[in-house]
């Protein structure tokens, strides 16, 4: 079985694949100081709860946007699984796609893997929106080439900045406003309207501009934790694919094994 590890700025997601099917997944807060032994104590218990032994894992692939986390994850793989992990973008797990931007080496592993998965799953020109610590908007042409994109603060970062730099505004949870009114009657509602509907307007505006610049019909694919929440309140997404990054890792590992 394949263990795919997606290291983001906020969370690390571990997913166990049988073929292309995810059999189990687990999430832990990203901390580059966490050792391979600490990962093992946590992960081995979860594998056992799901009914899998460590010997079931014979392949591992890692994608990380936090370089300092990679060493300890490699220790986990080598010491506890006896597997030399593939790393997305390196060696046998090279992306194998055209990265048509000024600095191709600066493209984050998550965005490259999203590009691979999106092109494999959906036809034509694409705009991939990934809700993470930052929200990224990526243009993928009909040939599967990465053409560039946009990086915007994630909605939680925006809310943290608002609360952290004002004296009296309370911390609120991200949620859809209770009704469609954009005139709030109290401080909390006004904050939620500003953050939530402001974010929706930002997404719709940026995607409209990207579509105009692409000049051809482009399907919008959304992924990441907040995709489902926003999908209920905007018609801008054509597809919501929560497992896009993990599916891209599985595809990259499959290609590496047959290369």
Image: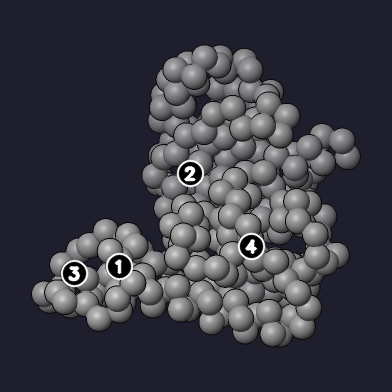
The location of residue 49, given as percent across then percent down, is 44, 17
* Res. 238 mark: 4
Q: Label 2 belongs to which residue?
A: 12
Lower sequence index among marks 4 and 2: 2
* Res. 80 mark: none
The part of the image, by quadrant, that contains residue 256 is: top right
The location of residue 141, given as percent across then percent down, is 79, 69
Q: Quadrant of the N terminus?
A: top right
The location of residue 57, given as percent across then percent down, is 64, 22
Residue 150 is left or right of residue 216, and the answer is left
Q: Are marks 4 and 2 in contact (CB under 8 Å)?
A: no
- For numbered disc 2, what is the local secondary structure? strand
- For numbered disc 3, what is the local secondary structure? helix
Lower sequence index among marks 3 and 4: 3
Residue depth check, mark 3 versus mark 4: number of the one nearer the observer:
4
Q: CA distance from mark 4 to mark 1?
A: 24 Å
Asked whether residue 139 appears in the rendered view, the answer is yes
The location of residue 56, given as percent across then percent down, is 63, 17
Q: Are marks 4 and 1 in contact (CB under 8 Å)?
A: no
Lower sequence index among marks 3 and 1: 1
Q: Label 3 belongs to which residue?
A: 188
- For numbered disc 4, what is the local secondary structure? loop
For mark 1, does the 10 Å Cα neighbourhood hold few (<14), some (14 to 19), or many (20 or more) residues?
A: few
Q: Label 1 belongs to which residue?
A: 179
């Amino acid at each position: 079985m394949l263990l795919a590890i997606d290291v983001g700025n906020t969370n690390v997601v571990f997913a166990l694949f049988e073929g292309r099917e995810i059999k189990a997944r687990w999430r832990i807060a990203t901390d580059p100081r966490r050792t391979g032994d600490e990962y093992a104590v946590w992960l081995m218990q979860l594998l056992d709860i799901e009914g899998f032994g460590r010997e079931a894992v014979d392949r591992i692939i890692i994608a990380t946007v936090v370089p300092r986390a990679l060493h300890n994850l490699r220790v986990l793989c080598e010491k506890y699984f006896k597997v030399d992990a593939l790393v997305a973008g390196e060696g046998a797990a090279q992306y194998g796609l055209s990265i048509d931007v000024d600095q191709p080496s600066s493209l984050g592993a998550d965005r490259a893997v999203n590009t691979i998965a999106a092109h494999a799953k959906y036809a034509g020109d694409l705009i991939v929106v990934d809700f993470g610590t930052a929200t990224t908007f990526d243009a993928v042409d009909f040939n599967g080439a990465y053409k560039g994109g946009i990086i915007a603060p994630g909605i939680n970062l925006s809310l943290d900045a608002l609360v952290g730099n004002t004296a009296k505004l309370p911390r609120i949870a991200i949620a859809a406003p209770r009704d469609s009114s954009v005139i709030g009657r109290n401080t909390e509602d006004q904050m939620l309207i500003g953050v939530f509907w402001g974010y929706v307007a930002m997404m719709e505006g940026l995607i409209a501009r990207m579509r105009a610049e692409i000049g051809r019909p482009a399907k919008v694919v959304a992924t990441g934790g907040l995709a489902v929440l926003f999908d209920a309140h905007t018609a801008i997404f054509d597809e919501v694919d929560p497992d896009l990054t993990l599916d891209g890792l599985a595809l990259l590992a499959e290609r590496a094994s047959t290369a």
